Image: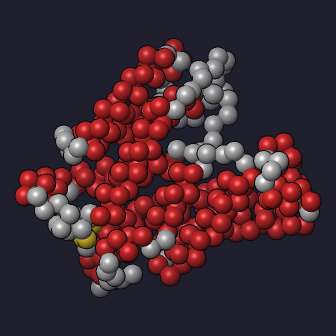
Amino acid sequence: MLDSRLQITLLQKSPPRFGQLITWLLLATGMILACWPFEMRVGARQGPVTVFSWLPAEVLASAWIFYLFRGLLIAGSVLWLLQRLLPWSCWMTVLGFTGVWAMHVENTYNAAHIFHVANNLLVIQALWVTFEVGEIRASLKAGSYWQTPLYPRWVFLAGVAYIGIFHSAAGLTKLLYSGPAWASGTSLQLWTYLWGHPWAPSTHLILSSRTFTACLQAATLVIESAAVLAIIPRLRMPIGVLLLGFYAGVLLTFDYGFHFNALFTALYLLPFERWLNRERVSGE
């Protein structure tokens, strides 16, 4: 009975308003990535870091391969935006996005996880279009795309689960490698002293009190580690609010590019999907 109810919930469909919004924002993120200035650095690689690490070093250091992935990303994004060559344009975009970011990571000594969330959400969106491509094409031809139930519940829940796993992995990794001592306050004060915005009020608060800073780090560990519980409907919004509070503090204090992570965390964990559909999905 439980499996049957779960299957019904996962396969339940709604109009594609939320799914299309996510797609548009991911494509915009992809265009930003395609235009992002990267510097190719010279030096020995220490080990595999991306899905393309198996390629020869000469290929990974090739500017031509970089531009090939960029072209693939731009072409795929434009075609997907125009809803042409579905679902092939979706996978062109995924390959181009993954390739551009991988090439950057393979050719630098310090890469922040600022495009990983968008990259994996793009895969989920491509899977949606691939599995529903027949109905999507039919609705586009009939001019009824926005009114036709095309967005399965599993697509949305897969995005929620991924965002939860992404953040929980960050928190649990800190505990695994540093233990609870990570939240001593010392490391955050050092980072803030070296790289914090001197004009930010949060910078002054962090540097002025070790106790306050330790509390911030302890809260970060708890919030990140528990993020996977966002898959539970009643916990989704509270976890979303707490994670957005974390991002607000980081973006106020540091020059980190976590804007995309914060944007998609807000869209999936706050009730935007429900607001857009103006209906409550059963089981939620």
Where, by quadrant of the figure, is residue 38 drawn?
top right
Which quadrant would residue 157 be assigned to in this image? Answer: bottom left
* Viewer-nearest residue: 201 or 82: 201
State which quarter of the image contains the N terminus.
Answer: bottom left
Tag count: 0
> Residue 225 appears at what percent x and percent y?
65, 65
The residue positioned farthest toward the left in the image shown: 142
Residue displayed at 30% across by 52% down? 127
- Is residue 53 shown to the viewer in this render? no
Is residue 62 positioned above or below 202 on the image? Answer: above
Report the side of 238 relative to 135 (left or right): right
- Front residue of this view, candidates 192 and 12: 192
Image coordinates of residue 54 in percent, x first then y, are 49, 27
Picture layout, residue 46 above or below residue 117: above
Q: What's the image's color scheme?
A: secondary structure
Q: Is residue 269 toward the left or the right of residue 154 in the image?
A: right
Q: Position of residue 266 (x, y in %)?
A: 51, 64
At 74% from the left and 68% from the top, the residue drawn is 219
Side of 52 relative to 240 (left or right): left
Residue drawn at x 66%, y 46% as measured from the top left: 256
Q: Is residue 146 left or right of residue 47?
A: left
Kindly tell me whether residue 231 is visible in this rendering.
Answer: yes
Q: Quadrant of the C terminus?
A: bottom left
User: Residue 152: x, y in percent?
Assistant: 27, 66
Nearer to us in this view, 205 or 243 = 205
Question: Residue drawn 40% across and 51% down?
Answer: 25
